Image (spheres, rainbow, N blue to C red):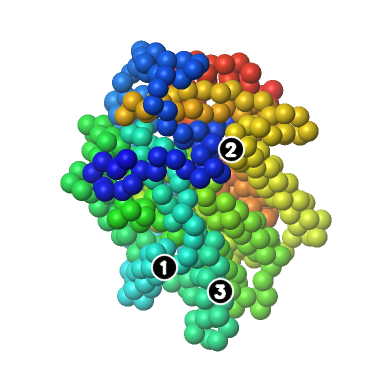
Protein backbone atom coordinates (compact mmCIF):
# COMPACT_ATOMS: atom_id res chain seq x y z
CA UNK A 1 0.00 0.00 0.00
CA UNK A 2 1.34 3.44 -0.90
CA UNK A 3 1.24 5.91 1.98
CA UNK A 4 -0.91 8.93 1.31
CA UNK A 5 0.67 12.24 0.30
CA UNK A 6 4.30 11.16 0.66
CA UNK A 7 5.01 8.43 -1.83
CA UNK A 8 6.36 6.28 1.01
CA UNK A 9 5.73 2.57 1.01
CA UNK A 10 3.78 1.47 4.04
CA UNK A 11 4.97 -2.10 4.77
CA UNK A 12 2.05 -4.52 4.72
CA UNK A 13 4.01 -6.92 6.92
CA UNK A 14 7.03 -6.43 9.15
CA UNK A 15 9.90 -8.82 9.85
CA UNK A 16 8.93 -11.35 12.52
CA UNK A 17 10.81 -9.58 15.30
CA UNK A 18 8.83 -6.42 14.68
CA UNK A 19 5.57 -7.90 13.51
CA UNK A 20 4.30 -9.14 16.84
CA UNK A 21 4.43 -6.15 19.16
CA UNK A 22 5.92 -2.73 19.66
CA UNK A 23 6.38 -0.82 22.88
CA UNK A 24 4.81 2.37 24.10
CA UNK A 25 6.21 4.27 27.03
CA UNK A 26 2.79 4.52 28.63
CA UNK A 27 1.22 1.88 30.79
CA UNK A 28 2.29 -1.72 30.40
CA UNK A 29 1.37 -1.38 26.79
CA UNK A 30 2.52 -3.61 23.94
CA UNK A 31 1.38 -2.74 20.43
CA UNK A 32 0.72 -5.34 17.73
CA UNK A 33 1.19 -3.77 14.32
CA UNK A 34 -0.37 -6.54 12.19
CA UNK A 35 -3.17 -5.24 9.96
CA UNK A 36 -6.40 -7.24 9.84
CA UNK A 37 -8.90 -6.90 7.04
CA UNK A 38 -11.86 -8.61 8.64
CA UNK A 39 -13.64 -8.69 11.99
CA UNK A 40 -11.53 -9.76 14.92
CA UNK A 41 -12.60 -13.11 16.37
CA UNK A 42 -12.96 -11.53 19.82
CA UNK A 43 -14.62 -8.20 19.02
CA UNK A 44 -16.13 -6.50 16.01
CA UNK A 45 -14.10 -3.59 14.68
CA UNK A 46 -17.31 -1.62 14.14
CA UNK A 47 -18.40 -2.21 17.72
CA UNK A 48 -14.97 -1.29 19.06
CA UNK A 49 -14.92 1.93 17.04
CA UNK A 50 -18.41 2.82 18.18
CA UNK A 51 -17.44 2.20 21.81
CA UNK A 52 -14.39 4.44 21.37
CA UNK A 53 -16.37 7.31 19.81
CA UNK A 54 -19.16 7.06 22.36
CA UNK A 55 -16.77 7.12 25.30
CA UNK A 56 -14.02 9.39 24.08
CA UNK A 57 -15.31 11.32 21.06
CA UNK A 58 -14.42 11.05 17.39
CA UNK A 59 -10.86 12.21 18.05
CA UNK A 60 -10.08 8.79 19.54
CA UNK A 61 -6.53 8.48 20.81
CA UNK A 62 -3.66 10.85 20.12
CA UNK A 63 -2.91 14.46 21.00
CA UNK A 64 -5.80 16.62 22.17
CA UNK A 65 -7.63 18.70 19.58
CA UNK A 66 -10.51 20.24 21.50
CA UNK A 67 -8.90 22.06 24.43
CA UNK A 68 -10.16 24.19 27.29
CA UNK A 69 -9.39 27.81 28.05
CA UNK A 70 -7.24 26.63 30.95
CA UNK A 71 -5.18 24.48 28.60
CA UNK A 72 -4.64 27.47 26.28
CA UNK A 73 -3.48 29.59 29.18
CA UNK A 74 -1.23 26.77 30.32
CA UNK A 75 0.41 26.66 26.89
CA UNK A 76 1.07 30.40 26.99
CA UNK A 77 2.45 30.07 30.52
CA UNK A 78 4.88 27.31 29.47
CA UNK A 79 6.02 29.29 26.42
CA UNK A 80 6.97 32.13 28.78
CA UNK A 81 8.03 30.25 31.90
CA UNK A 82 10.46 27.68 30.47
CA UNK A 83 12.82 30.14 28.72
CA UNK A 84 12.66 32.44 31.75
CA UNK A 85 13.60 29.59 34.09
CA UNK A 86 16.46 28.39 31.91
CA UNK A 87 17.78 31.97 31.69
CA UNK A 88 17.53 32.38 35.47
CA UNK A 89 19.47 29.17 36.10
CA UNK A 90 22.15 30.28 33.64
CA UNK A 91 22.44 33.65 35.41
CA UNK A 92 22.55 31.93 38.81
CA UNK A 93 25.49 29.74 37.85
CA UNK A 94 27.53 32.21 35.80
CA UNK A 95 27.11 35.12 38.24
CA UNK A 96 26.30 33.64 41.68
CA UNK A 97 27.97 30.21 41.82
CA UNK A 98 24.65 28.45 41.22
CA UNK A 99 22.82 30.02 44.19
CA UNK A 100 19.10 30.32 43.42
CA UNK A 101 18.41 32.95 46.08
CA UNK A 102 21.40 35.25 45.49
CA UNK A 103 20.12 36.78 42.21
CA UNK A 104 16.79 37.74 43.78
CA UNK A 105 18.55 39.12 46.86
CA UNK A 106 20.86 41.14 44.61
CA UNK A 107 17.95 42.61 42.65
CA UNK A 108 16.07 43.71 45.76
CA UNK A 109 19.14 45.26 47.35
CA UNK A 110 20.59 46.88 44.25
CA UNK A 111 20.47 50.64 43.77
CA UNK A 112 19.98 49.98 40.05
CA UNK A 113 17.96 46.74 39.78
CA UNK A 114 17.32 47.13 36.06
CA UNK A 115 21.03 47.39 35.33
CA UNK A 116 21.69 44.39 37.54
CA UNK A 117 19.06 42.41 35.69
CA UNK A 118 20.39 43.43 32.28
CA UNK A 119 23.91 42.45 33.29
CA UNK A 120 22.78 38.84 33.56
CA UNK A 121 21.84 38.58 29.87
CA UNK A 122 24.27 36.47 27.86
CA UNK A 123 25.66 38.05 24.71
CA UNK A 124 25.93 36.29 21.36
CA UNK A 125 29.40 35.69 20.00
CA UNK A 126 30.52 34.77 16.51
CA UNK A 127 32.57 31.82 17.74
CA UNK A 128 29.69 30.33 19.71
CA UNK A 129 27.17 30.96 16.92
CA UNK A 130 29.35 29.47 14.20
CA UNK A 131 30.36 26.60 16.45
CA UNK A 132 26.73 25.78 17.26
CA UNK A 133 25.70 25.97 13.59
CA UNK A 134 28.55 23.62 12.63
CA UNK A 135 27.53 21.27 15.44
CA UNK A 136 23.94 20.97 14.19
CA UNK A 137 25.04 20.64 10.55
CA UNK A 138 27.62 17.99 11.41
CA UNK A 139 25.08 15.98 13.38
CA UNK A 140 22.61 16.29 10.50
CA UNK A 141 25.19 14.91 8.06
CA UNK A 142 26.14 12.05 10.39
CA UNK A 143 22.45 11.23 10.82
CA UNK A 144 22.32 10.60 7.06
CA UNK A 145 25.66 8.98 6.22
CA UNK A 146 26.56 6.83 9.24
CA UNK A 147 25.39 3.23 8.73
CA UNK A 148 22.56 1.89 10.87
CA UNK A 149 19.60 -0.42 10.68
CA UNK A 150 16.09 0.64 9.75
CA UNK A 151 13.65 0.51 12.65
CA UNK A 152 9.90 1.02 12.71
CA UNK A 153 7.91 3.15 15.11
CA UNK A 154 4.43 2.60 16.41
CA UNK A 155 1.50 2.92 14.05
CA UNK A 156 0.21 6.49 14.00
CA UNK A 157 -3.45 7.41 14.63
CA UNK A 158 -3.91 7.69 10.84
CA UNK A 159 -2.44 4.23 10.33
CA UNK A 160 1.09 4.99 9.13
CA UNK A 161 3.96 2.73 10.13
CA UNK A 162 7.09 4.80 9.49
CA UNK A 163 10.71 3.69 9.07
CA UNK A 164 13.56 5.36 11.00
CA UNK A 165 17.32 5.35 10.52
CA UNK A 166 18.66 3.88 13.78
CA UNK A 167 22.36 4.82 13.93
CA UNK A 168 22.49 6.87 17.14
CA UNK A 169 25.00 4.69 18.99
CA UNK A 170 27.43 4.78 16.07
CA UNK A 171 27.09 8.56 15.80
CA UNK A 172 27.48 8.95 19.59
CA UNK A 173 30.73 6.95 19.62
CA UNK A 174 32.08 8.70 16.52
CA UNK A 175 31.30 12.16 17.95
CA UNK A 176 32.95 11.47 21.30
CA UNK A 177 36.01 9.87 19.69
CA UNK A 178 36.37 12.92 17.42
CA UNK A 179 36.12 15.22 20.45
CA UNK A 180 38.71 13.19 22.40
CA UNK A 181 41.14 13.12 19.46
CA UNK A 182 40.73 16.87 18.92
CA UNK A 183 41.51 17.52 22.61
CA UNK A 184 44.45 15.10 22.66
CA UNK A 185 46.15 16.76 19.68
CA UNK A 186 45.48 20.26 20.98
CA UNK A 187 43.04 21.25 18.25
CA UNK A 188 40.51 22.35 20.88
CA UNK A 189 40.66 22.63 24.67
CA UNK A 190 38.60 20.13 26.67
CA UNK A 191 36.71 23.02 28.27
CA UNK A 192 35.71 24.62 24.97
CA UNK A 193 31.97 24.17 25.54
CA UNK A 194 32.17 25.51 29.10
CA UNK A 195 34.24 28.50 27.90
CA UNK A 196 31.55 29.53 25.40
CA UNK A 197 28.55 28.46 27.48
CA UNK A 198 26.66 31.77 27.45
CA UNK A 199 27.14 32.33 23.72
CA UNK A 200 25.99 28.77 23.03
CA UNK A 201 22.90 29.43 25.14
CA UNK A 202 21.97 32.35 22.86
CA UNK A 203 22.66 30.36 19.68
CA UNK A 204 20.64 27.37 20.90
CA UNK A 205 17.68 29.60 21.76
CA UNK A 206 17.72 31.25 18.36
CA UNK A 207 17.73 27.85 16.69
CA UNK A 208 15.05 26.45 19.01
CA UNK A 209 12.64 29.31 18.31
CA UNK A 210 13.28 29.24 14.56
CA UNK A 211 12.73 25.49 14.54
CA UNK A 212 9.43 25.93 16.41
CA UNK A 213 8.19 28.47 13.86
CA UNK A 214 9.39 26.31 10.97
CA UNK A 215 7.54 23.28 12.36
CA UNK A 216 4.31 25.28 12.61
CA UNK A 217 4.59 26.69 9.07
CA UNK A 218 5.57 23.32 7.62
CA UNK A 219 2.57 21.69 9.28
CA UNK A 220 0.27 24.19 7.62
CA UNK A 221 1.72 24.27 4.11
CA UNK A 222 3.97 21.23 3.58
CA UNK A 223 2.88 18.46 5.95
CA UNK A 224 4.48 15.06 5.57
CA UNK A 225 1.33 13.21 6.68
CA UNK A 226 -1.69 15.57 6.63
CA UNK A 227 -4.04 13.02 8.23
CA UNK A 228 -1.95 12.91 11.40
CA UNK A 229 -2.04 16.67 12.04
CA UNK A 230 -3.96 18.08 14.99
CA UNK A 231 -5.15 21.71 15.00
CA UNK A 232 -6.60 22.97 18.26
CA UNK A 233 -7.81 26.41 17.17
CA UNK A 234 -5.26 28.03 19.50
CA UNK A 235 -2.04 29.18 17.87
CA UNK A 236 -0.31 29.15 21.26
CA UNK A 237 -1.26 25.57 22.04
CA UNK A 238 -0.37 24.45 18.52
CA UNK A 239 3.00 26.18 18.75
CA UNK A 240 3.61 24.62 22.16
CA UNK A 241 2.50 21.03 21.55
CA UNK A 242 2.96 20.86 17.78
CA UNK A 243 0.67 20.10 14.87
CA UNK A 244 2.54 17.60 12.71
CA UNK A 245 3.05 14.16 14.15
CA UNK A 246 6.11 13.10 12.16
CA UNK A 247 7.54 16.01 10.14
CA UNK A 248 10.12 14.71 7.71
CA UNK A 249 12.40 15.55 4.83
CA UNK A 250 12.19 12.64 2.43
CA UNK A 251 11.49 9.16 3.73
CA UNK A 252 13.93 8.86 6.64
CA UNK A 253 15.04 12.31 7.87
CA UNK A 254 12.75 12.61 10.89
CA UNK A 255 12.70 15.87 12.85
CA UNK A 256 11.61 14.31 16.14
CA UNK A 257 14.19 11.53 16.28
CA UNK A 258 17.01 13.76 15.05
CA UNK A 259 16.50 16.67 17.41
CA UNK A 260 15.93 14.60 20.50
CA UNK A 261 18.80 12.21 19.95
CA UNK A 262 21.44 14.19 18.13
CA UNK A 263 21.97 17.87 19.07
CA UNK A 264 20.37 17.16 22.45
CA UNK A 265 21.31 13.83 23.98
CA UNK A 266 24.68 13.39 22.23
CA UNK A 267 25.60 16.83 23.56
CA UNK A 268 24.61 15.84 27.12
CA UNK A 269 27.78 13.91 27.99
CA UNK A 270 29.97 16.13 25.79
CA UNK A 271 28.89 19.08 27.94
CA UNK A 272 29.64 17.13 31.13
CA UNK A 273 33.10 16.23 29.83
CA UNK A 274 33.79 19.82 28.81
CA UNK A 275 32.89 21.17 32.26
CA UNK A 276 35.12 18.46 33.74
CA UNK A 277 37.89 19.71 31.46
CA UNK A 278 37.28 23.27 32.66
CA UNK A 279 37.38 22.01 36.26
CA UNK A 280 40.71 20.34 35.56
CA UNK A 281 42.06 23.60 34.16
CA UNK A 282 41.01 25.34 37.39
CA UNK A 283 41.97 22.71 39.99
CA UNK A 284 44.54 20.52 38.30
CA UNK A 285 42.34 17.45 38.76
CA UNK A 286 38.72 16.28 38.34
CA UNK A 287 36.71 15.67 41.53
CA UNK A 288 35.15 12.30 42.26
CA UNK A 289 31.71 13.91 42.26
CA UNK A 290 32.25 15.11 38.68
CA UNK A 291 33.34 11.61 37.65
CA UNK A 292 30.17 10.21 39.25
CA UNK A 293 27.97 12.67 37.36
CA UNK A 294 29.68 11.84 34.06
CA UNK A 295 29.28 8.10 34.72
CA UNK A 296 25.61 8.28 35.74
CA UNK A 297 24.67 10.60 32.88
CA UNK A 298 26.67 8.42 30.50
CA UNK A 299 24.91 5.29 31.75
CA UNK A 300 21.56 6.81 30.87
CA UNK A 301 22.70 8.24 27.51
CA UNK A 302 24.49 5.12 26.27
CA UNK A 303 21.46 3.04 27.27
CA UNK A 304 19.27 5.39 25.25
CA UNK A 305 21.32 4.94 22.09
CA UNK A 306 21.92 1.21 22.61
CA UNK A 307 18.14 0.81 22.77
CA UNK A 308 17.31 3.49 20.20
CA UNK A 309 15.04 1.12 18.29
CA UNK A 310 12.98 0.68 21.47
CA UNK A 311 12.78 4.46 21.86
CA UNK A 312 10.87 4.65 18.56
CA UNK A 313 7.85 3.29 20.40
CA UNK A 314 7.98 5.55 23.46
CA UNK A 315 5.86 8.60 24.19
CA UNK A 316 8.11 11.21 22.50
CA UNK A 317 7.92 9.48 19.11
CA UNK A 318 4.67 7.53 19.44
CA UNK A 319 2.44 10.26 20.89
CA UNK A 320 3.94 13.76 20.94
CA UNK A 321 3.57 16.11 18.00
CA UNK A 322 6.53 18.27 16.98
CA UNK A 323 6.29 21.80 18.35
CA UNK A 324 8.03 24.00 20.92
CA UNK A 325 7.76 21.23 23.51
CA UNK A 326 10.21 19.08 21.52
CA UNK A 327 11.88 21.61 19.21
CA UNK A 328 12.98 24.17 21.82
CA UNK A 329 12.98 21.54 24.54
CA UNK A 330 15.49 19.30 22.75
CA UNK A 331 17.79 22.13 21.67
CA UNK A 332 17.76 24.30 24.82
CA UNK A 333 16.04 22.70 27.80
CA UNK A 334 17.71 19.30 27.53
CA UNK A 335 21.36 20.32 27.06
CA UNK A 336 21.26 23.33 29.39
CA UNK A 337 19.03 22.03 32.20
CA UNK A 338 19.93 18.33 32.25
CA UNK A 339 23.62 19.17 32.69
CA UNK A 340 23.13 21.39 35.74
CA UNK A 341 25.05 18.97 37.97
CA UNK A 342 28.22 19.29 35.87
CA UNK A 343 27.80 23.06 35.72
CA UNK A 344 27.32 23.21 39.49
CA UNK A 345 30.43 21.12 40.19
CA UNK A 346 32.52 23.39 38.00
CA UNK A 347 31.55 26.41 40.08
CA UNK A 348 31.39 24.48 43.37
CA UNK A 349 33.94 21.62 43.30
CA UNK A 350 33.12 18.83 45.77
CA UNK A 351 35.07 15.72 46.73
CA UNK A 352 32.75 13.22 48.38
CA UNK A 353 33.84 10.89 51.16
CA UNK A 354 34.40 7.38 49.82
CA UNK A 355 31.32 5.96 51.53
CA UNK A 356 29.10 8.78 50.19
CA UNK A 357 30.45 8.27 46.67
CA UNK A 358 29.85 4.51 46.97
CA UNK A 359 26.27 5.08 48.18
CA UNK A 360 25.53 7.44 45.29
CA UNK A 361 27.06 4.96 42.84
CA UNK A 362 25.01 2.07 44.25
CA UNK A 363 21.77 4.07 44.20
CA UNK A 364 22.32 5.10 40.59
CA UNK A 365 23.24 1.62 39.38
CA UNK A 366 20.32 0.10 41.32
CA UNK A 367 17.90 2.57 39.78
CA UNK A 368 19.29 1.84 36.33
CA UNK A 369 18.88 -1.90 36.90
CA UNK A 370 15.19 -1.45 37.74
CA UNK A 371 14.69 0.85 34.74
CA UNK A 372 16.43 -1.49 32.29
CA UNK A 373 14.99 -4.74 33.70
CA UNK A 374 11.43 -3.41 33.53
CA UNK A 375 11.89 -2.30 29.94
CA UNK A 376 13.56 -5.59 29.06
CA UNK A 377 10.48 -7.43 30.29
CA UNK A 378 8.39 -5.44 27.81
CA UNK A 379 10.89 -6.14 25.02
CA UNK A 380 10.80 -9.85 25.81
CA UNK A 381 7.02 -9.95 25.61
CA UNK A 382 7.16 -7.93 22.41
CA UNK A 383 9.59 -10.29 20.69
CA UNK A 384 7.70 -13.45 21.69
CA UNK A 385 4.09 -12.27 21.36
CA UNK A 386 3.69 -12.95 25.07
CA UNK A 387 4.89 -16.56 24.81
CA UNK A 388 7.69 -16.25 27.36
CA UNK A 389 8.42 -16.44 31.08
CA UNK A 390 9.01 -13.55 33.47
CA UNK A 391 10.47 -14.29 36.89
CA UNK A 392 10.13 -18.00 36.16
CA UNK A 393 6.41 -17.87 35.35
CA UNK A 394 4.51 -17.62 32.07
CA UNK A 395 3.94 -13.98 31.14
CA UNK A 396 0.42 -12.75 31.82
CA UNK A 397 -1.03 -10.45 29.18
CA UNK A 398 -4.36 -8.97 28.17
CA UNK A 399 -4.91 -9.31 24.42
CA UNK A 400 -6.70 -6.29 23.02
CA UNK A 401 -7.98 -4.77 19.80
CA UNK A 402 -7.93 -1.13 18.72
CA UNK A 403 -8.87 0.78 15.56
CA UNK A 404 -6.89 3.57 13.88
CA UNK A 405 -8.58 6.52 12.21
CA UNK A 406 -8.23 4.90 8.78
CA UNK A 407 -10.57 2.11 9.98
CA UNK A 408 -7.89 -0.58 10.16
CA UNK A 409 -8.05 -3.05 13.04
CA UNK A 410 -4.94 -3.83 15.11
CA UNK A 411 -4.17 -6.04 18.06
CA UNK A 412 -2.01 -5.35 21.10
CA UNK A 413 -0.88 -6.77 24.41
CA UNK A 414 -1.07 -5.27 27.89
CA UNK A 415 1.58 -6.84 30.11
CA UNK A 416 0.61 -7.61 33.71
CA UNK A 417 3.63 -9.69 34.78
CA UNK A 418 6.90 -8.79 36.45
CA UNK A 419 7.41 -5.15 37.35
CA UNK A 420 4.39 -4.31 35.17
CA UNK A 421 2.18 -6.27 37.54
CA UNK A 422 3.35 -4.01 40.40
CA UNK A 423 2.36 -0.71 38.83
CA UNK A 424 1.60 0.85 35.43
CA UNK A 425 5.02 2.54 35.29
CA UNK A 426 7.38 0.85 37.71
CA UNK A 427 10.20 1.57 35.26
CA UNK A 428 9.80 5.20 36.31
CA UNK A 429 10.73 4.24 39.88
CA UNK A 430 14.14 3.17 38.58
CA UNK A 431 14.33 6.34 36.51
CA UNK A 432 13.67 8.47 39.59
CA UNK A 433 16.27 6.63 41.71
CA UNK A 434 18.90 7.15 39.00
CA UNK A 435 17.91 10.81 38.67
CA UNK A 436 18.21 11.34 42.42
CA UNK A 437 21.69 9.77 42.43
CA UNK A 438 22.80 12.22 39.73
CA UNK A 439 21.75 15.09 41.99
CA UNK A 440 23.09 13.57 45.23
CA UNK A 441 26.58 13.48 43.71
CA UNK A 442 26.61 17.27 44.19
CA UNK A 443 26.24 17.15 47.98
CA UNK A 444 23.69 19.05 50.04
CA UNK A 445 24.86 22.65 49.90
CA UNK A 446 22.54 24.06 47.21
CA UNK A 447 19.10 23.33 45.79
CA UNK A 448 19.98 23.98 42.13
CA UNK A 449 21.56 20.58 41.32
CA UNK A 450 18.41 18.91 42.70
CA UNK A 451 16.26 20.63 40.12
CA UNK A 452 16.61 17.56 37.89
CA UNK A 453 14.93 15.13 40.30
CA UNK A 454 12.17 17.66 41.04
CA UNK A 455 11.60 18.19 37.34
CA UNK A 456 11.69 14.46 36.56
CA UNK A 457 9.17 13.69 39.29
CA UNK A 458 6.76 16.26 37.82
CA UNK A 459 7.47 15.22 34.22
CA UNK A 460 7.03 11.50 34.82
CA UNK A 461 3.82 11.96 36.78
CA UNK A 462 2.51 14.15 33.96
CA UNK A 463 3.47 11.41 31.50
CA UNK A 464 1.63 8.87 33.62
CA UNK A 465 -1.48 11.04 33.48
CA UNK A 466 -1.16 11.47 29.70
CA UNK A 467 -0.60 7.76 29.28
CA UNK A 468 -3.68 6.92 31.32
CA UNK A 469 -5.84 9.25 29.21
CA UNK A 470 -4.42 7.93 25.94
CA UNK A 471 -4.66 4.26 26.86
CA UNK A 472 -8.18 4.65 28.20
CA UNK A 473 -9.23 6.26 24.92
CA UNK A 474 -7.38 3.72 22.82
CA UNK A 475 -8.28 0.48 24.63
CA UNK A 476 -11.56 1.20 26.39
CA UNK A 477 -12.82 -1.89 28.21
CA UNK A 478 -9.44 -3.62 27.97
CA UNK A 479 -7.81 -0.76 29.84
CA UNK A 480 -10.51 -0.98 32.51
CA UNK A 481 -9.66 -4.65 32.96
CA UNK A 482 -5.96 -3.83 33.15
CA UNK A 483 -6.53 -1.20 35.85
CA UNK A 484 -8.49 -3.69 37.93
CA UNK A 485 -5.60 -6.15 37.79
CA UNK A 486 -2.89 -3.48 38.31
CA UNK A 487 -4.47 -0.69 40.40
CA UNK A 488 -1.32 1.34 41.12
CA UNK A 489 0.16 3.84 38.66
CA UNK A 490 3.69 4.31 40.04
CA UNK A 491 4.48 3.15 43.59
CA UNK A 492 2.81 -0.13 44.65
CA UNK A 493 0.55 0.32 47.67
CA UNK A 494 0.84 4.11 47.53
CA UNK A 495 -0.07 5.56 44.12
- Distance of mark 1 from mark 2, alpha carbons? 30 Å
- Residue position for label 3: 177
Q: Which mark is residue 145?
A: 1
Can the viewer see residue 303 in this picture?
yes
- Distance of mark 3 from mark 1, alpha carbons? 17 Å
Residue at the left extreme, as displayed: 221
- Residue position for label 2: 382
Q: Is residue 220 left or right of residue 153?
A: left
Label 2: state its secondary structure. helix
Q: Are marks 1 and 2 in contact (CB under 8 Å)?
A: no
Label 1: state its secondary structure. helix
User: Circle 2: is it few (<14), some (14-19), or many (20+) Cα within 10 Å?
Assistant: many
- Distance of mark 3 from mark 2, alpha carbons? 34 Å
Locate residue 367, reporting x and y percent: 69, 45
Nearest the camera: 408 or 306? 408
User: Circle 1: is it few (<14), some (14-19), or many (20+) Cα within 10 Å?
Assistant: few
Residue at point 58%, 31% (across, down): 28
Nearest the camera: 120 or 368? 368
* Lower position in the chain sequence, tag 3 or tag 1: 1
Locate residue 493, reporting x and y percent: 69, 23
The nearer-to-camera label among 3 and 2 is: 2
Residue at point 41%, 49% (across, down): 163
Q: Is residue 63 left or right of residue 299?
A: left
Nearest the camera: 40 or 158? 40
Nearest the camera: 81 or 395? 395
Amino acid sequence: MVARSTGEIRPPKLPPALETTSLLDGGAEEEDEVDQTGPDPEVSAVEERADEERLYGKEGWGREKDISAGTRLGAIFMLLFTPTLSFYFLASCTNYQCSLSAPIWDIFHSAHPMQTWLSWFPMPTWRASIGYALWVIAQGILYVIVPGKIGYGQRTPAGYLLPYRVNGLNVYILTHVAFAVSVYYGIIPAGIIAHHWQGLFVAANVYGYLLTIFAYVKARYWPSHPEDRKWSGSIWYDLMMGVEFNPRIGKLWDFKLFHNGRPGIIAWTLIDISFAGAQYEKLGYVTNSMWLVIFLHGLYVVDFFYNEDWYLRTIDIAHDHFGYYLAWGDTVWLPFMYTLQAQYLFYNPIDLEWYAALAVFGLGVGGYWIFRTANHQKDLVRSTDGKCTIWGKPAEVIRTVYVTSDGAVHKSLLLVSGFWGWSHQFNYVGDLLLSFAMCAACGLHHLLPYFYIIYMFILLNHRIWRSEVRCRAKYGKYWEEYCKRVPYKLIPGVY
